[in-house]
Image (tube, rainbow, N blue to C red):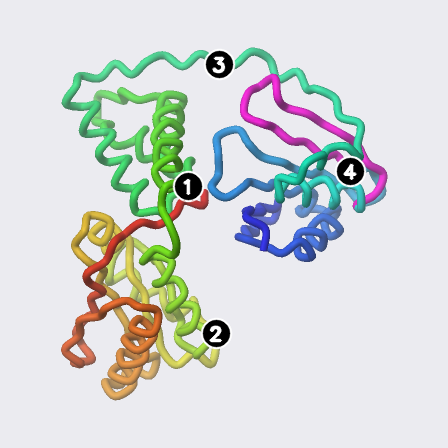
């Protein structure tokens, strides 16, 4: 799998696609509402991306940016194969990936100057603490972190953080976290959890991470998430994520779609077995109405974006 995220005009978002799947997406674009795709590496880095635009009957426009405004390039191709070769090489960090096309530098104008935040020390610490909580949770993208930063200190009479300042703060803290995670070795507990949830999903149990804002919303929406033949569900919501990221373990909510306590208990046993199979410890008193808690848990979720 390629360590990339692909987003399309029709709002698809695909994480870690294969080279064949990426090629299929490039060949597919061209119709109304499905004319471009944007590719970011994992983890996402500010102003580092590639993108393709194509309308049926026309050429392909391929762009890539390597951070600074003076590192934004464009090339044209009359068919998809040259684009596929270039964008796949870009995704793989292959040497000479850009050698098959004629690139030109795009004039993006001067970089915008972002004024410093006008916050006192207490407000700055409070703001950075909140952004870092969302960052350590590991599910937010940079745009979502910027939204947190922009809105957190807002009052009826004051909006102290502009969108540009929020983006600058989110980008800085994101890069700090990327540097932190570069030192992590091997599989982390959140990755083990994802592996367990994948097994449960394949076994007919609708499994969702960081799903909705709270328990009641999760219970009301989980039924619309699964396949028609799903037997039951397991999920944790964003407040559970915050608790896990703060070192308090992770609460899992589960149940059966038939509403019976017998099915709920059976689902609970399957969830615990899947967790233990990947090396995680679950605490559960086997009562179908009681949540399962994954603890101890070292919450180090690698960023995607």
Residue denoted by label 3 = 112
The local secondary structure at tag 2 comes to: loop
Q: Quadrant of the C terminus?
A: top left
Q: Is residue 293 magenta?
A: no
Percent across and percent down for residue 282 are: 22, 70
Toward which corner of the image does residue 115 lie, by quadrant?
top left
Magenta span covers which residues? 61-80
CA gap, disc 3 and disc 1 = 22 Å
User: Label 4 belongs to which residue?
Assistant: 60
Q: CA distance from mark 4 to mark 1?
A: 28 Å
Q: Sequence-wise, which precedes: disc 4 or disc 1?
A: 4
Instruction: Relative to 303, say whether 189 is above or below.
Output: below
- The residue lying toward the viewer, choosing from 236 and 300, is 300
Residue 297, numbered label: none
Residue at 68% from the left image edge and 36% from the top image edge: 95
Q: Would you say the magenta stretch is mainly helix, strand or loop?
A: strand
Q: Find residue 236 and report its horizontal and vertical position in percent.
A: 29, 61
Identify the residue under disc 2. Answer: 227
Mark 2 or mark 1, which is nearer to you?
Answer: 1
Rendering coords of residue 177 (x, y %): 35, 36
Badge 4: few (under 14), some or many (20 or more) residues near its Cα, within 10 Å? many
Q: Mark 4 falls on what kind of element?
A: strand
Q: Which mark is residue 141?
A: 1
Earlier sequence position, callout 2 versus callout 1: 1
């Amino acid at each position: 799998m390629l360590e990339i995220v692909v987003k399309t005009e029709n709002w698809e978002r695909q994480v870690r696609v294969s080279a064949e799947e990426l090629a299929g997406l490039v060949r597919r674009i061209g119709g109304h509402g499905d004319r471009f795709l944007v590719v970011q590496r994992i983890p996402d880095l500010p102003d580092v991306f590639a993108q393709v635009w194509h309308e049926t009957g026309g050429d392909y426009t391929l762009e890539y940016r390597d951070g600074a405004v003076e590192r934004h390039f464009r090339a044209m191709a009359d068919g998809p194969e040259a684009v596929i070769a270039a964008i796949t090489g870009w995704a793989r960090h292959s040497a000479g990936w850009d050698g098959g096309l004629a690139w030109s530098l795009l004039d993006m104008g001067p970089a915008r100057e972002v004024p410093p935040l006008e916050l006192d020390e207490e407000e700055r610490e409070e703001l950075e603490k909140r952004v870092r909580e969302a960052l350590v949770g590991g599910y937010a993208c940079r745009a979502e972190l910027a939204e947190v930063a922009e809105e957190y200190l807002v009052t009826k009479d004051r909006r102290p953080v502009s969108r540009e300042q929020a983006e600058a703060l989110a980008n800085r803290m994101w890069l700090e976290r990327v540097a932190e995670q570069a030192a992590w070795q091997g599989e982390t507990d959140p990755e083990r959890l994802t592996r367990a949830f994948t097994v449960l999903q394949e076994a007919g149990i609708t499994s969702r991470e960081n799903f909705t804002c709270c328990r009641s919303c999760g219970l009301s929406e989980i039924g619309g998430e699964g396949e028609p033949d799903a037997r039951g569900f397991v999920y944790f919501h964003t407040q559970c994520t915050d608790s896990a990221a703060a070192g308090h373990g992770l609460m899992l909510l589960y149940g059966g779609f038939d509403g019976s306590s017998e099915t709920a208990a059976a689902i609970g046993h399957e969830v615990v077995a899947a967790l233990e199979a990947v090396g995680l410890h679950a605490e559960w008193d086997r009562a179908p109405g009681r949540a399962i808690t994954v603890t101890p848990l070292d919450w180090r979720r690698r960023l995607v974006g």
